[in-house]
Every structure is written in structure tokens, then in C-alpha cells.
Image (tube, coloured by chain):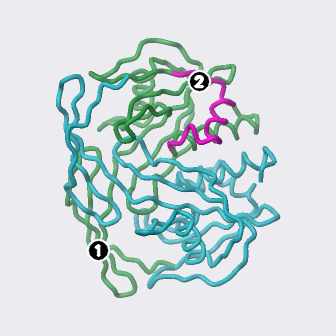
Chain colours: A cyan, B green
Amino acid sequence: MNSIKIVSKKNVFDGGRFKVKKVELEIKNVKKTHFDVERKPVVCVFPLTDSYEIYLISQYRYFFEKNILECVAGFIDENETSLKAAKRELKEEAGLLASQWELIGKQDLAASVVKGTLFLFLAKDLEEAAQDLKTGEVIKVVKMPLEEAVKKVMSGEINSVETVSGILILDRLRREKKL
Amino acid sequence: MNSIKIVSKKNVFDGGRFKVKKVELEIKNVKKTHFDVERKPVVCVFPLTDSYEIYLISQYRYFFEKNILECVAGFIDENETSLKAAKRELKEEAGLLASQWELIGKQDLAASVVKGTLFLFLAKDLEEAAQDLKTGEVIKVVKMPLEEAVKKVMSGEINSVETVSGILILDRLRREKKL
């Protein structure tokens, strides 16, 4: 049962990688105003070797003022498909090429405040090449057994939610013998 | 190795549940300006019965213009601990009281663009009470075996990333016989 109606919606701030929208809602005849963030869609890539090793990356994030161990990820550019973006980011950030791709999840960041879609890809049949880093970007590629990555999730050492989600999906797929 | 320096940071927009900050960075002597979103921290609650049934909620989300099956979640109020917020949200949204609480994850929404911490709680030893809904809020409480929730994650029917993360952590904890 839906008692919420969108009366109006307009952009009030453009942050480049996201927009802020002012949304007027009508909830049971009462008007309410919200500000929402709409972030550009993101791809997350989980490259896995034939012997169940996963590649993650470690980079300095000024948000947290430290190095973060996370999955390869990036925004989908204009006129780019999610798969094309995934291939581009995997090469740029991890220096990897992959010939087998599978979408293992299409998730949403949150159902309120921040709208942002995540496309999670499994990349297999890997080939090591060179990174294409932007100026100032320092990204360390880290390869480890999937089981070790799962342990780092469970201990909280890996704690970016999209990385957690992807690693645990792979863990479950492996247990279901679908990997 | 950190080649990124924060030169300045100031609020440029206040959306209530989030703030937009303008951040001036210096990357290898080159100045760059970013806009970042800082969202208020959120608690996510995963109530589990002794027979491994999980309570989720279904509510209309105008973001997606449909009902979404997700975990109990909400913002941490000013001067409130994450545990107190978790207890409050569990009662408000699901009408449940719990006497056993465990923090099963402290995660970050994303390492760029949106900074937002998620506190994931397992709630056990449950007692059914009444919801405390706000005007216009219509929240349906849905109880199902944890295994069924995991299947809904794997099929993509459950796709909010924090809900995915929490359910798969419980699945793994159960397999490790820690649940």
C-alpha cells in the first residue's frame, strides 16, 4: 500500500559524480520536503583465478585518511555499458584483462537518502597486463585466496560494503559449486 | 604511499540527513576540487529467532517507486549510541524487542563520493511487541528462514547492499557454527 506521492523533484546541487535533488512528497495529505542524493552508477569487479584466488586493490582514501583494501570499482561513463566500464576499470586499476564475465549482482546503495546502483561483476580467465593509472593514483594490486578475503570480511579488515557483498556472494556461489 | 593531501574542506550544502562538502585536494602538486557527501551513520538490524528465522521489512520506497524487502534500518540520532538506535529502530519498524545484541559488522558505504558508516547488528532472544510507526509509514514485517533470505539475495530479489551484506554475514557465521 503506497501512501507516499512525489509532488515535485528538482536538481538543487550538482556535485559532478552526484546530484542533490529536492523532493516534495505528499504523505497522507501532509506535504514534506526531502533532499536526496543521486550518485552515478558504479561497477565493482571481482577477478578470480582458476585456483580461487581473488584480486583486490589497496589505495589511499582521503575520506578515511588511510589505505583501504577493496574491490576494483569505478563510475560508469556516459554512453558506456556497465560491462564496458567493468572491463575498463579492471584494466586501469588492476592491470588485468578477463575473457569471462558474469553479472553476479545488481544492488542499490540504500533505499533512502542516497540512490546509487552497483553492478557487481565476476571476471574470470584472467591475463595480467599493465595498469593505466591517472596522475597521482597509487594502487597496489593484492592477490589472495578467496577464503582469506572472506576471513578479512568476517574480521572487519575488509569493510567497504560493496566489497563485502561481492566477496560473500562469491563465497556462497563457491559453496553452491556454481563458481 | 600517500600522494593525496587535503588542503581545505567546507560545507556547501546541508540536506539534513547528509551534508555536501567541498574538498580541495593536492595530488602531486596539482590542485583538484571534489564534492563529497557525508551521510549520517546508519544502523541495520538483523533479528534472528532460535530456529534461524530472520525478520525483514517490506515498505514502499519512492526512490524506486515500489515496495522493497530490506532489513530494519535507520539513522543514529544525535546523542544516541549505535546500539540504542538499533533497539529503537527494531521496535519502531518491526515491533520487536531483543535481549541479545551483537555487532556483526561496521562497514562503509563507499570509499569515494559518499561517506556513510553502517553498524550491522544481530538481535536475538526476540519478543514480539507493537510497531511505533510515523504518520504515513506502512511497514510490513516479513519472517522467513534465513536460508530463504539467502536465496532471495542470490536471485537478486533482495538487492539493497547493506541487507545483502548482513544476510550473507549471518549465513557465513551459521556455517562457521558461530550463530
- Residue A101, position as x, y percentages in the image: 67, 63
Question: Label 2, label 1: how many angstroms apart (C-alpha)?
Answer: 46 Å
Q: Which disc is residue B33 wearing?
A: 1
At label 2, the amino acid type is: Lys
Q: Residues within 10 Å of mark 1 (few under 14, many from 20)?
A: some
The residue segment tinted magenta is B142-160
Quarter in which the C terminus of chain A is drawn: bottom right
Chain under callout 2: B
**Measuring 43% from the left and 44% from the top, which residue is drawn there?**
A110
Instruction: Judge the density around disc 2: few (<14), some (14-19), many (≥20) Cα neighbours within 10 Å.
Output: many
Q: Quadrant of residue A98?
A: bottom right
Q: Residue A45's spot in the image, x, y percent?
A: 60, 63
The chain to which mark 1 is attached is: B
Q: Nearer the viewer, residue A24 or B149?
A: A24
Q: Is residue B50 above or below residue A157?
A: above
For the residue labelled by badge 2, is the local secondary structure a helix, a strand or a loop?
Answer: strand
Q: Give the labeled residue for mark 2.
A: B124
Q: Quadrant of the N terminus of chain A?
A: top left
Q: Is residue B165 left or right of residue B119?
A: right
Q: Residue furthest bottom?
A: B29
Identify the residue at the far front of this view. A79
Nearer mark to the viewer, of 2 and 1: 1
**First in residue order: circle 2 vs circle 1:** 1
**Contact (Cβ within 8 Å) of mark 2 with mark 1:** no
Under tag 1, what secondary structure? Answer: strand
Residue positioned 55% across, 69% down in the render: A84
* The one of B178 and B34 positioned closer to us in this rendering: B34
Q: Position of residue A153 (x, y in %)?
A: 63, 52
